[in-house]
Amino acid sequence: MSVPLRGTEVPKQLWKQISGDLEMVIIWWFWSLLAICASDSFRDQAVAIMRTTPVIDGHNDLPWQLLNLFNNQLLRPDADLNKLAQTHTNIPKLKAGFVGGQFWSAYMPCDTQDKDAVKRILEQMDVIHRMCQLYPETFMCVTNSSDILQAFRRGKVASLIGVEGGHLIDSSLGVLRTLYHLGMRYLTLTHNCNTPWADNWLVDRGDDEAESQGLSPFGKRLLNEMNRLGVMIDLSHVSVATMKDALQISRAPVIFSHSSAYSLCPHRRNVPDDVLQLVKNTSSLVMVNFFNNFVSCSDSATLPQVADHLDHIKKVAGAGAVGLGGDYDGVTMLPVGLEDVSKYPDLIAELLRRNWTETEVRGLLADNLIRVFSEVELVSNNMQSPEEVPITLKELDGSCRTYYGYSQAHSIHLQTGALVASLASLLFRLHLL
C-alpha cells in the first residue's frame, strides 16, 4: 500500500469538482465533434445535390464592375476573369460555388434617364456577349429555359441578360423589342427612380413622389408586350403599388430578381407578406438578396440570417416561390459566410440542417426559376400583334429629345418659335427704354 506524500493529498470534494469539470469538457468536445461531423455531412450532401442541380442566380453585377474597373476592355491582362481578385465574382469562384446559371445585370444608373440610357445599356449588353465569346469554355450565352439545361449538361455557366431599370428602354416599346432580340430576358421595371410609367420603391419611403400610382396606362401596355415577347417582369426596386399592379395584370408569373422578406427586415426594397401572398397565388418567384441592409437592416449580417429569409418566404409563399439573387458585385456589404459566389454550398448546407427536403433545395437552386421561365415562354405569343400605341408626348421629359412621329410635334415647334419671337420683341422694347 502506497502512502501519499505529505502535501499531495487531494480532498474528495476537489476531486469531485475536477471530475465534474472534466466530464463537462468531454461532453462539450463530443458534441462539438459531432456538430462538425454533421456540418461536413450537410455540406457533402449540398455538394452532391449541386453537382446535378447547380445554382441559377438571379442577379450579378459583374458587368458593372467591368465597366468601372476596365471601361469594358476585357482583353486587358488585369481584366482576366480567371484571375480577377477585387470582385465577388470570377471563374474559379463560380466553379467553387457550383453556379450553373447566371442572370448578368445590364445596368446603368438613373442619371442616364432622358439622356444616353439606350446607348449605354447596349454597351453593357455587349460586354456580356463578349464574356461568352472570350471564355467559351466557361460561359454559354442562352436565351431560353431549355438551353439552360443544355448548359448544365455541358458543365458551363448558362449566361442570361437581365436589364436593371425601366429607364433604360427610354419609354419605348420599340426599344423593349430590340433589347429582347439582343438577349434581354428580364426587365426590372424601375431602379432607384420613377420612370414616366412606373413608380419605384423610394415612393414608399417618402423620398420620391408617386407619379403613376403604380403603373400608368402605358406601363400596363408595356407589361402586356413583355408577356407577348416572353420577357420576365422583375419587380425588385419597384413600389408596393407597382408590385400589386404587375402581379394583377401579368398573364405569366413574375420574379423579384434580388429582394428579401420585409417581415424580417423592414426595408422598402424587400417584399411584404401581403405581396408574398400574391406571389403564391400567381406561382411567382422571390430570389433572395444577400445585401446586409436588406438581410438584417444593419451593416452586419450572417449566413443563417439569409436562411431565415428563405425560410420565411417558403412559409408564406410556398417552397416553389424561393430563389437566390445574391446581388454580388452590386453591393458593398455581404453576410459573414457569404462573402463571394463560392459560398453557395455553405448556404445550402444550412438549409439542409434546417430540414429542407432535397426537392425543396433543388427548387431553390434552379427548378423554381426554370419553371417560371418556362411558363413565361408558354404565355408568349409572337403571332399576336405587338403593342403599337406609344407613350404620350406629355409623359416624356428631357431637353435632348426630338418629337418625330408625334402629331403635336409641329405645334410644339410653332409654339417655341412664337415664344422666341415674343422674347425678342420684349428685349427690343426694354432696349428702347
Image (tube, helix red, strand yellow):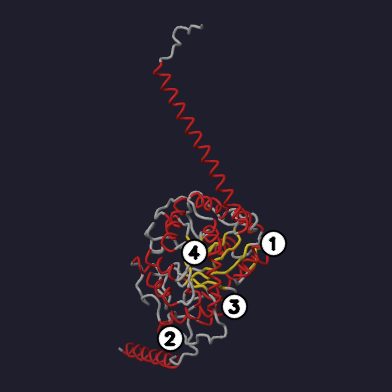
Disc with the residue nearer the chain's start (2 vs 3):
3
- Residue identified by numbered label 1: 137
In this view, the residue in front, 76 or 194, is 194
- Residue identified by numbered label 4: 320
Of labels 4 and 2, the one closer to you: 4
Disc with the residue nearer the chain's start (4 vs 1):
1
- What amino acid is labelled 1 in the image? Glu
Report helix, strand or loop for mark 3: helix
- Residue identified by numbered label 2: 393
In the displayed structure, 145 sits above or below 33; it is below
Report helix, strand or loop for mark 4: helix
Report how far apart the C-alphas of labels 2 and 3 lie in the structure: 26 Å
Going by the image, does 297 lie left or right of 156? left
Q: Quadrant of residue 92?
A: bottom right
Pointer 2: residues within 10 angstroms few (<14), some, or many (20+)?
Answer: few
- What amino acid is labelled 2 in the image? Leu
- Residue identified by numbered label 3: 181
Of labels 2 and 3, the one closer to you: 3
Of labels 2 and 1, the one closer to you: 1
- What amino acid is labelled 4 in the image? Gly
Disc with the residue nearer the chain's start (4 vs 3):
3
Q: Is the C terminus in the top left, top right, bottom left or bottom right quadrant? A: bottom left
- What amino acid is labelled 3 in the image? His
Report helix, strand or loop for mark 1: loop
Going by the image, does 208 lie left or right of 156? left
Q: Give the image location of residue 256, x and y in percent.
A: 47, 66
Report how far apart the C-alphas of labels 4 and 2 lie in the structure: 42 Å
Pointer 3: residues within 10 angstroms few (<14), some, or many (20+)?
Answer: few
Report how far apart the C-alphas of labels 4 and 3 lie in the structure: 29 Å
Pointer 4: residues within 10 angstroms few (<14), some, or many (20+)?
Answer: many
